[in-house]
Amino acid sequence: MSSQLTATPRDIPLQNLYQLLQPITSSKASFNNWGQSFYCAPLAIFEPENEFQCELILELARREGKSVKAAGVGHSPSDLACTNEYMLRTTKLNRLLEVNVEKHYVVAQGGITLHDLHAQLGVYNLAMTNVGSISDQTLAGIITTATHGSGIEYGVISTHVIGLTLLLANGTRVFCSRNERPDLFIATICGLGATGLILSIQLEVEPAFRLKEIQESMSFDDFIHRFDKLVYSAQHVRFWWFPASDTPKNPVGGWWWHTFLGYHVTQLFLFIARYFLFLNTWISHYTCWLIKKQTVGVDDSHRIFNVDCRYPQHTTEWAIPFEEAQCCLSELRNWLEKESEDPNGIRPHVPVEIRFSAPDNIWLSPSYGQRTCWIGIVQYK
């Protein structure tokens, strides 16, 4: 009995490996991302509940000559997680392991979602420093993709990582940080999962705070003319651009305004516009009309950072050097105007989301060494 307890995965016979992994092997070996834009049928999908099971999965892959792709909740709009070999879902590796209120850091397993992390941080009166527009993703997912929020003086969320515990492809478990194995650390915090499986993350946090959000509409020309001043006008600034209406903002309101008109009616219009493209221009005017008034909101930080992602969608986002952002946005507007003049031209859905981040030194980060303007475009399904 004692020899079994001290056995390493390499010592376990292959048939025993199959038996140990059977309880965490999904009965349905298929995967869709959240936007339902990519699908794959892995050879097997494993859902480990502890780190030892992760080691067993990698050992089986080594013996079978298979690769392993890690996937969280599948919220990436790309096919990054897709594979026809082994998939490791991290959603059950979702515990908060350590909280240090005095030193302002926590340690959490990589599969915890940001929604759950916000709730657990709130118990200790703590919060993440910056958050993107959604909190559906896993913590490891946002770290390995250098996910960002908005704020020209705030780096991508990976810049708040203090240290990582990784399971390497050879089964070795290692800790890395800016001081310990720094090359591995920098490669991992925007490594797209290529350096190993992120088991746990030591994350810098801060005392819980609330944000005041002021939303107002302006013309595109005014936006471009005051671009630098607006970007630096608050800690966190973002814009929603409605090209057909030439206006940047975000919808708020009660059930009738926000849920019925802003969600259900808009969804119906978007569905119809799949077959009658000219309606997309009218929808842009309609949604802009819904949010034309100035609004002010105060709430917990993550609730202000997050927005309702609404419907399944195709998404693309472009990282533009901040110094080129005004020119890029103006050119994009000119191109969209030309498309609108063409009866068969593109009619983009709205809004176009525009956000910002500070420079960092993460090798694969789009913000490496430069301030960045992020331009996100969606097409609802």
Image (cartoon, rainbow, N blue to C red):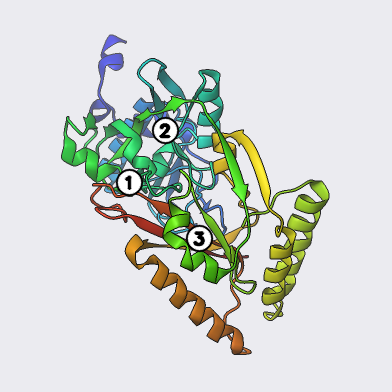
Chain-order first, disc 2 or disc 1: 2
Q: Is residue 172 visible?
A: no
Image location of residue 169, percent across then percent down: 24, 40
Q: Which residue is mark 1?
A: 193
Residue kind at label 2, given as amino acid type: Leu
Chain-order first, disc 1 or disc 3: 3
Callout in the foreground (2, 1) = 1
Q: Which residue is mark 2?
A: 21
Image location of residue 259, percent across then percent down: 77, 51
352 over 182 or under it: above or below: below
**Distance from Cα at disc 3 to Cα at disc 2:** 27 Å
Q: Look at 51% across and 18% down and name the residue there.
A: 124
Q: Residue furthest right?
A: 256
Q: Considering the image in quadrants, where does the C terminus appear?
A: bottom right
Q: Which residue is mark 3?
A: 38
**Distance from Cα at disc 2 to Cα at disc 1:** 22 Å
Q: Residues within 10 Å of mark 1 (few under 14, many from 20)?
A: many
Rendering quarter of residue 306: top right
Whether residues under marks 2 and 1 lie with C-beta atoms below 8 angstroms apart, the answer is no
123 over 298 or under it: above or below: above
Image location of residue 339, percent across then percent down: 55, 84
Q: Look at 31% across and 47% down and name the residue there.
A: 190
Q: Considering the image in quadrants, where does the N terminus appear?
A: top left
